[in-house]
Image (tube, rainbow, N blue to C red):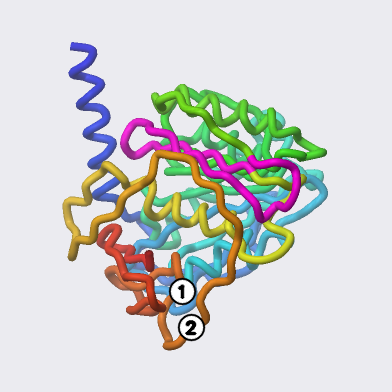
Amino acid sequence: MVYAATVWFILLASLHYALGSATPGCGKTPPSSGTRTIGSRQYILQVPDNYNASRPYKLIFGFHWLGGNMNNVAPNYFGLRELAQEGAIFVAPNGLDNGWANTGDRDTTLVNQILAEIKDGLCVEDTQIFATGFSYGAGMSYSLACSNPGDFRAVSVIAGAELSGCTGGETRIAYLGIHGVVDSVLPISTGRGLRDRYLRVNDCQAKDAPEPPKGSDSNYTKTEYTCTAGYPVWWMAHGGDHVPGPSSGQNWMAEHTWDFWTRAIYVGISDPTPTATSSTSMSTGTTSTTTSQQPQPTVSCAAHWGQCGGQGWPGYSCCQSPFVCTVLNTWHHQCL
């Protein structure tokens, strides 16, 4: 009986994420982009250009590092806004004392208030809410993975540690961890510890996770664990120090985060309302690669990882060669 109940829970959760659900803000006149205030706290809201109130959007939170502030995250959001191509709503909250101590759950409370405000005022696909951050901001993203797995579909934790607490932490959530092997601020062992929690919680199969030698932060390895469908865990180690992104070349951290959020979390989960089909597969091994320049656009089409369609999508409808516009779900087609 316990086994049967567990299977039904997984099936229902998978169906929930595949079907999705729009928020009360759909159909309403949207608030303007800019700095907004909740009590004594602030956050920056970025509403997509050509926003369509009848189309649900992804919602992405970006958290700054210790000593930083929301203006260090907006408007680029660790390179993710460019990849979203105006297909997502972005939020950059401002931490107290330039950090995320989360004393008395004060920062979790802020996030919950922001979620409520945005869902009421904007059209959000509430099964596509994500969080990322660097350093202290990574700690806050991890804390939300622990406390708010019912709100957040996945997190990307860049050079993080358990700095903002972990209330709960026993419910599945898709987890991506990125860390430098010679991180001089938060040693890579702290990142491994965060990863290991979700290897356990997501029922992942054990495997070796090779890491690169000290050197360039453009040299990295990626380990994709085999976990419960819909709840993957990826671990990416690079040869560098404590950095929010590569010091030069292609922003592979942003690209892999976007791929994780828009493709990997759907592997093994069927979307019951696709408009077309295109098969994708995930390697469960470990790969090592270095950055290279993306192909230059030859026509007005989306680049690799960019959005190329979906219901209500106002942007590109084609991909730069050799990439193919692949249907991930009703609302999101991506160049893969």
Q: Quadrant of residue 10?
A: top left
Q: Is residue 73 left or right of residue 15?
A: right
Query: In this view of the protein, can residue 42 be seen by the observer?
Result: no
Which residue is situated farthest in the bottom direction here? 299
Give coordinates of residue 46: x percent, y percent: 56, 67
Q: Residue at x 26, y 43 (%)?
A: 269
Where does the image place residue 274, in percent across and percent down from the top left? 19, 59
Q: 208 and 266: which one is in front?
A: 208
Residue type of the residue flagged with mark 1: Ala
Residue 103 located left or right of residue 151: right
Read off the magenta span. 212-237
Tag of residue 297:
2
Residue drawn where x is 32% and y is 70% of the image: 324
**Which residue is painted at 63% across and 59% down in the image?**
78
Q: Is residue 4 positioned above or below 60 on the image?
A: above
Please report the residue visible at 30 percent of the width from the left and 68 percent of the height from the top.
Answer: 310
N-term mark: 2 or 1: 2
As drawn, is 271 to the left or to the right of 186? Answer: left
Q: Is residue 39 magenta?
A: no
Q: Secondary structure at mark 1?
A: loop
Callout 2 touching callout 1 (CB < 8 Å): yes
Q: Determine the image quadrant of residue 283.
A: top left
- Tag 1 residue: 303
| Gap in angstroms between the C-alphas marked 2 and 1 | 7 Å
